[in-house]
Image (cartoon, rainbow, N blue to C red):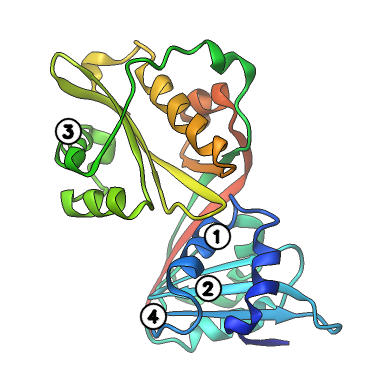
Amino acid sequence: MIRRLTENDHGHCFQLLKEKPAENLFILGDIEAYGYEQEFQKLWGDFSDNGELIAILLKYQENYIPYAKGDYNAKGFAEIMLSDPAFSMLSGLKDVTEKLEPYLSHRLKRKRETYYAKCTKMIPATTDVDTSLVEQAVPGDAEELVQLLNSIPEFNDTIITVERKRRGLEDGVSRSFFIKEDGKMVSTASTAAENSLSAMVVGVATLDAYKKKGYATQCMVKLCDQLLEEEKELCLFYDNPSAGVIYKRIGFEDIGFWMMYSFKKN
C-alpha cells in the first residue's frame, strides 16, 4: 500500500533511511531541512501487508528520488510521478530506479550513470599524509573558492556562484578545505548536502600547474578525517574508474551506481 508520509511517520521513515545514510544522503538532508508538509516537497511510503515501511519516494520540486531495500511497488511510484505536471527528473541508486524504467521509458529524454562510493573509515596509510598546509574555509573565502573552481575545465558545466557557496558555508550544509601556494588557492575539496548522518564530497580540484604534489589528497584527508570524527558517512560520485583512484586510496569503496534521468513533460 502506498500513501503520503507525514510527520507522524518520521520515526519509521528515519529508521529505514539511516540503515544506509550515505546512500540516502539527499532524502535525509531534505527531510531534515524541510520536513513533510512543504508544497515543493512531498514523501510517499510503500507499506507491506503487515504494515512495515519498505520503500520511500521523495519529491523535491521537479525531481524524484526513490529508496527501497528490495522489491517495492514500482508501478505505483511511477504513477505518482507521471501524475505530477512538474515531473521531469529522477535520480537514485540503480538497483532501485531500474525497476521504475519500464513505466517511465515513454517519457525518457536522457539518462546518466555514475559510480557511487562511500567512506566509513580511512585506510591506515592516510595517517602518514601531511595536512599541515590545509586550511578550512570560512564564508569570506567563498569568492576565491568559486574563482578556483571556475578556472578548472571539468567544472565548466557546473553552476557555482559566490552567493551559493557563501550561504552553504554559513548554514553548515557545506564545508571546504584548501591549500594556497604563491599567494593563491591552488587545490580544494568540499562537502555538500550535509545532514546529521552523512555528507557528499564535491569540488575536488587542483590547478594544472600545481598537480602531482598530493594537494588534492591532502585536502581530502583533512576533510574526511573531520567528517568521520563527527560519525558521518561520506559519499561521492565519479565518472570513470581512473577518476576513482584517489578516493580509493583514502578509503572509499564502490557501493553501486547512481542514476540521473531527465524526462519530457506532459
| Disc 4/disc 2 C-alpha distance (Å) | 10 Å
Q: Is residue 142 above or below residue 179?
A: below
| Position in image of residue 184 (x %, y %) | 15, 22
| Disc 3/disc 4 C-alpha distance (Å) | 34 Å
**Residue tagged by mark 4?**
40
Q: Nearer the viewer, mark 1 or mark 2?
A: 2
* Amino acid at circle 1: Gly
**Quarter occupied by residue 137:** top left
- Label 1: few (<14), some or many (≥20) within 10 Å? many
Q: Residues at badges 4 and 1 in contact (C-beta under 8 Å)?
A: no
- Label 3: few (<14), some or many (≥20) within 10 Å? few
Residue 138 visible? The answer is yes
- Mark identifier at residue 92: 1
**Residue tagged by mark 3?**
151
**Residue tagged by mark 2?**
58
Q: Nearer the viewer, residue 69 or 181?
A: 181
| Disc 4/disc 1 C-alpha distance (Å) | 19 Å
- Mark identifier at residue 70: none
Q: Secondary structure at mark 2?
A: strand
Q: Quadrant of the N terminus?
A: bottom right
